[in-house]
Amino acid sequence: MRIAGVWADGPAGYVVCYEMASLNLRLGLDVIADTVNPVQATRTAWRNVAMSLGVPFVEVEVICSDKDEHRMRITSRRSDIAGLMLPTWDDVEDRLYEAWDRDHIVVDTAHRTVEESLKALRGALSVR
């Protein structure tokens, strides 16, 4: 949408992603929706995509419980997408976040490598 010069406040990007996920699931492909989803409405919409097609799904919340490490990650990262402005630490702290209201997997990445976090996720998935 950004490359096409189409950018609007609101849910447009999520709606496009829901449709892309639905199309891929109908093709029998797996889908990983790697999005922030800070509110119940977006989490429910993702869930509804899978449920409407009768495909299994797992909800995963990735967190960094160490505030100092989280801040360091936010302030030190650089965008590899031309023109993309990454959120600042203030943006992250000021973002609306609604607590989860249903069972889901939580992966805490604090003090873990990517590989260790993936191992934790695989372990949590294996007991489901």
Image (cartoon, helix red, strand yellow):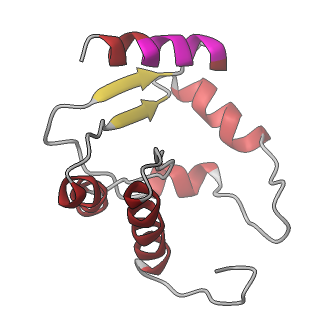
Horizontal relation, residue 14 to residue 127: left or right: right
Residue 79 percent coordinates (x, y): 80, 54
The magenta span reads: 115-122
Q: Residue at x 19, y 53 (%)?
A: 51
Image quadrant of residue 7?
Answer: bottom right
Does 127 appear above or below 8?
above
Q: Nearer the viewer, residue 110 or 117?
A: 117
Q: Is residue 113 visible?
A: no
Q: Residue at x 45, y 32 (%)?
A: 62
Q: Nearer the viewer, residue 63 or 123?
A: 123
Q: Nearer the viewer, residue 4 or 80?
A: 4
Residue 114: say if magenta: no
Residue 16 percent coordinates (x, y): 47, 75
Q: Residue at x 77, y 42 (%)?
A: 77
Q: Residue at x 42, y 23 (%)?
A: 107
Residue 121: say if magenta: yes
Secondary structure of the magenta portion, mostly?
A: helix
Q: Is residue 57 visible?
A: yes
Residue 102 percent coordinates (x, y): 14, 38
Residue 3 percent coordinates (x, y): 75, 80
Horizontal relation, residue 99 to residue 20: left or right: left
Does 18 appear above or below 104?
below
Does 23 appear above or below 108?
below
Q: Nearer the viewer, residue 102 or 67?
A: 102
